[in-house]
Amino acid sequence: MITAYISIGSNIEREHYLPAGIAAVTQLATSWRMSRVFEAEPVGFDGDNFFNSVVEITTSLSLTVLQQSLKDIERQLGRPEAATKNQSRTIDLDILLYGDVISECSPTLPRSDLYKFAFVLWPMSELCPELVIPGQQHTIAELWQNFSPQQQLWPVELS
């Protein structure tokens, strides 16, 4: 069993697709827990605000199978296979961490979003503040304390 952290985001029909993405991801897990949901302005393009969260899962899936399963979920939930970065989407599922794996090939781990985006780092700081990122010396809490967000972000309640 391995612990993985998955970033989940949606800005198209987000009240529908974020819960659907969470439900699908948790089906890949033997146990799971989730950060709060945050609303965030898009980064790098004009579009509707996102709902974002991070889900921690315990899974027996290999990294390759988990990555493919997440891509399958994205397609099932209406994300085009040829979708590009910096555009609106029904669902976006990214592996942030997969155990202690460090990888420079797809998927790159730890995912660089951990160091760049408040919509990833704030939820991670809720889930696992004392976690040390593989290959680093700092905890998630330390990264968050020293982070200067360039993006507006706030917690929201989903109905």
Image (cartoon, rainbow, N blue to C red):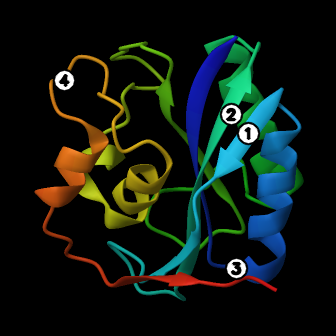
The amino acid on which the numbered mark 2 sits, given as a three-letter code, is: Ile
Mark 1–mark 2 contact, CB under 8 Å?
yes
Residue at 86% x, 47% y: name it. Answer: 24
Residue 135 image position (x, y, % from top left): 23, 17
The mark nearer the N terminus, 3 or 4, is 3
Near-viewer residue (124 or 74) = 124
CA distance separating discs 3 and 2: 25 Å
Reply above or below: 4 against 51: above
Q: Kindly state the secondary structure of the residue where label 1 is placed.
A: strand
Real-space CA distance between mark 3 and mark 4, rounded to the nearest whole angstrom: 35 Å
Distance in Å between CA atoms under marks 4 and 1:
24 Å
Q: Which mark is residue 12?
A: 3
Residue 13 image offset from top left, x and y in percent: 76, 82
Residue identified by numbered label 1: 32
How many angstroms separate mark 1 from mark 3 (CA)?
Answer: 25 Å
Q: CA–CA distance between discs 1 and 2?
A: 4 Å
Of the two numbered discs 3 and 2 in the rendering, the one whose residue sits closer to the viewer: 2
Q: Which residue is mark 4?
A: 136
Which amino acid, mark 3?
Answer: Ile
Mark 4 or 1, nearer chain start: 1
Picture coordinates of residue 33 (x, y %)? 69, 46
- The residue type indicated by label 4 comes to Gln
Amino acid type, residue under disc 1 in the picture: Trp
Mark before the other along the chain sequence, 1 or 3:
3
Residue at disc 3, secondary structure: loop
Q: In the image, 102: left or right of 145?
A: right
- Please report whichever mark, 1 or 2, sits nearer to the chain's N-terminal start: 1
